[in-house]
Amino acid sequence: MTLLIPDEYPKSLFRDDGKRLDGRDIYDLRPIKMEVDVIKNADGSAYIEWGNNKIFASVYGPREVHPHHLAKPDKGILRVFYRMATFSVFDRKRPAPGRREKEISMIISDCLEPVLFLELYPGTSFEIFIEVVDADGGTRCASTTVAALALADAGVPMRSLVTSCAIGKIDGKLVTDLSGIEDKAGDADLPVAITWFNDEMSLLQFDGKMTKGEMDTSLDMAQDALKKIYDMQLEALKRKYIKIQKDVQDMEVE
Ligand code: UDP
């Protein structure tokens, strides 16, 4: 990963050949890899590599709520703990959860809650622990995406998966999936998440400047990117069950 401090931001975020600094075209996502069932002690878990981001999510629940006073008599609660490891960024991150981590935890929780049937689990909690071990822009989107996968891996009933991705503007051009340097040195950042059961956006944040027309185009670009990422989530889940099926078939043969 290229490490840069603000004084060293590149003059242009596009190369002479028109590609982005990491070689992508404007609509390209960074390379994404996903895997479920990666933490044996969790009820469900998932791992994502999204560009240089490396993120684990583990899910526990439904289980008793601690501290008890947080429990709700009429529904379950969802608690999300997004954390960045001290070594996940260029400047060592303080280990205590800061304001940013608390805010991102809340955002991810708001993104995921609409797909859960919390009303069926009064007095209990679902907890999602998200550990960013390497961060390079778009960690809230990658975390939301991997957390949804971990919930599905845990067998938690869900109305649908949730998928998230950012669209941004760099050097005046709209681009899909901002990298860390594009996020820092670019003009605008628009993280979006979708709940597929109703095609509604459960996250829409915006930082920077865009015209109304650019905003409309960004949402169309987000729709295309989200569909690609959703297909990868489904493939990651299917791979687990294909492996189980194969293991069972192998046992039957023996
Ligand atoms: N970042 C960092 N130190 C921090 C927080 C963030 O270096 O304390 C970097 C990290 O690479 C992160 C990026 O800045 O992915 C953008 O952070 P932002 O708050 O915009 O959230 P994100 O884009 O990760 O959702």
Image (cartoon, rainbow, N blue to C red):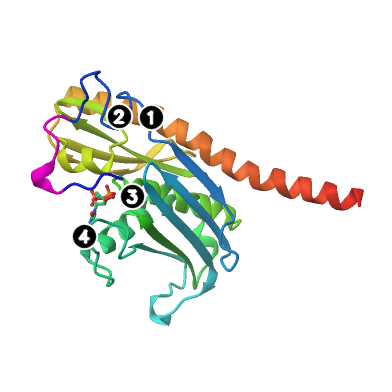
What amino acid is labelled 2 in the image?
A: Leu
Residue farthest along the top direction in this orientation: 17
The reply to whether dot 4 and dot 1 touch (C-beta < 8 Å) is: no
Residue 10 among magenta residues: yes
Q: Which residue is mark 2?
A: 219
In the rendered view of the protein, which quadrant contains the N terminus? top left
What amino acid is labelled 1 in the image?
A: Gln
> Residue 204, located in which quarter of the rendered image?
top left
Q: Give percent across and percent down for residue 231.
A: 52, 34
Q: Which residue is mark 3?
A: 139
Instruction: Give the crowd class for mark 3: few <14, some 14-19, many >=20 residues within 10 Å.
Output: many
Q: Which residue is mark 4?
A: 91
Nearest to viewer (mark 3 / mark 4): 4
Q: Which comes before the other along the chain, label 3 or label 4?
A: 4
Residue farthest along the left direction in this orientation: 7
Whether 204 is drawn above or below 74: the answer is above
Q: CA distance from mark 3 to mark 1?
A: 19 Å
Q: Which comes before the other along the chain, label 4 or label 1?
A: 4
